[in-house]
Amino acid sequence: MAPSAPQILVVEDDRETRALIARYLRANACNVAVAADGREMDRHLADSRVDLVVLDLMLPGEDGLSLCRRLRSQSQLPIIMLTARGEDVDRILGLEMGADDYLGKPFNPRELLARINAVLRRQAAALTANLTKGATALTFLGWNIDLRLRELRNPEGARVAITSAEFDLLQAFCERPGRVLSRDNLLDLTQGRAAGSFERSIDVLVSRIRRKLERGPDQSGIIKTVRSGGYLFTPVVEPA
């Protein structure tokens, strides 16, 4: 099942900037609510689900730094701060107050979207790590990977033949979903440098795993290739 569209709250007092951000994010599969100041932000947070806050630093009344500090004291809600200021001290203050990322104005909306997606992926990976810590089996899209028995079963419950190297790589992906893993990362996680392995071996193993998991057009894209980055395991993973 595809993940639901992220719920983004944009807190920005400039009407044109607020509208620009909201329009771009909505055009790129995000649900967006907007607020002009801290009071409107609080009302949205009290009434609606929010997955991430885009928070301007310079706001009327309570400023962005104060709002960021207050939000972080109450929850782990992801925060990306925006500011017209370019000084490093402002960026550092924002991060010290608990912001997950920081973007200076003017900015390209495409970069903001990329940062939003990156922060949400990191949060999803952290949540999955907490949920799956100590689990002996994991499940995704109906598939089951038994970490104790080192078995893979398809959605019908049938055991699927898998080599030890393939299993190690699939386990590495399942324990880090939604996170771009370079070939070097995957080598370190599965084979180690002492093994004398090379990056091409990861590509071969990924190809083999794809053939086993992606059984039809609706199953394509389970392991995405990220250009100049590595690979991304896309499904939601849960303890079985």
Image (cartoon, helix red, strand yellow):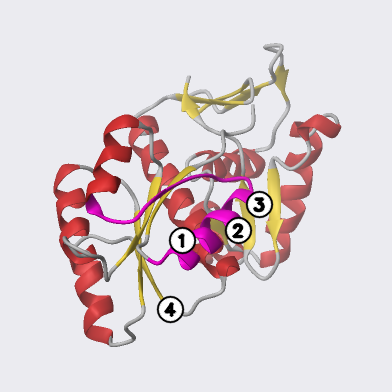
Q: Is residue 166 magenta?
A: no
- Relative height, residue 190 to residue 160 (above, below): below
The residue range painted magenta reads: 14-38
Q: Residue at x 36, y 80 (%)?
A: 84
Label 4 vs 1, first from the N-terminus: 1
Kindly identify which numbered label has been placed on residue 27: 3
Q: Amino acid at mark 2?
A: Tyr
Relative to the observer, which residue lies in front, 234 or 4?
A: 4
- Circles 4 and 2, Cβ within 8 Å, touching? The answer is no
- Circles 2 and 3, Cβ within 8 Å, touching? The answer is yes
Label 4 vs 2, first from the N-terminus: 2
The residue positioned farthest toward the bottom in the image shown = 87
From mark 2 to mark 3, how far is it between C-alphas? 5 Å
Could you say whether the residue bearing mark 1 is in a helix, strand or loop?
helix
- Relative height, residue 145 to residue 38 (above, below): above
Q: Residue at x 20, y 51 (%)?
A: 72
Give the total of numbered labels.
Answer: 4
Label 2 vs 1, first from the N-terminus: 1
Q: Amino acid at mark 3?
A: Ala
Label 4 vs 3, first from the N-terminus: 3
Q: Position of residue 225 (x, y in %)?
A: 71, 56
Q: Residue at x 40, y 67 (%)?
A: 14
Could you say whether the residue bearing mark 3 is in a helix, strand or loop?
helix
Image quarter for residue 24?
bottom right
- Relative height, residue 72 to residue 198 (above, below): above
Residue where numbered disc 2 is placed: 24
Asked whether residue 191 is in view, the answer is: no
Kindly identify which numbered label has been placed on residue 105: 4
Relative to the observer, which residue lies in front, 44 or 51?
A: 44
The residue positioned farthest toward the front in the image shown = 15
From mark 4 to mark 3, how far is it between C-alphas? 21 Å
Q: Position of residue 112 (x, y in %)?
A: 51, 65
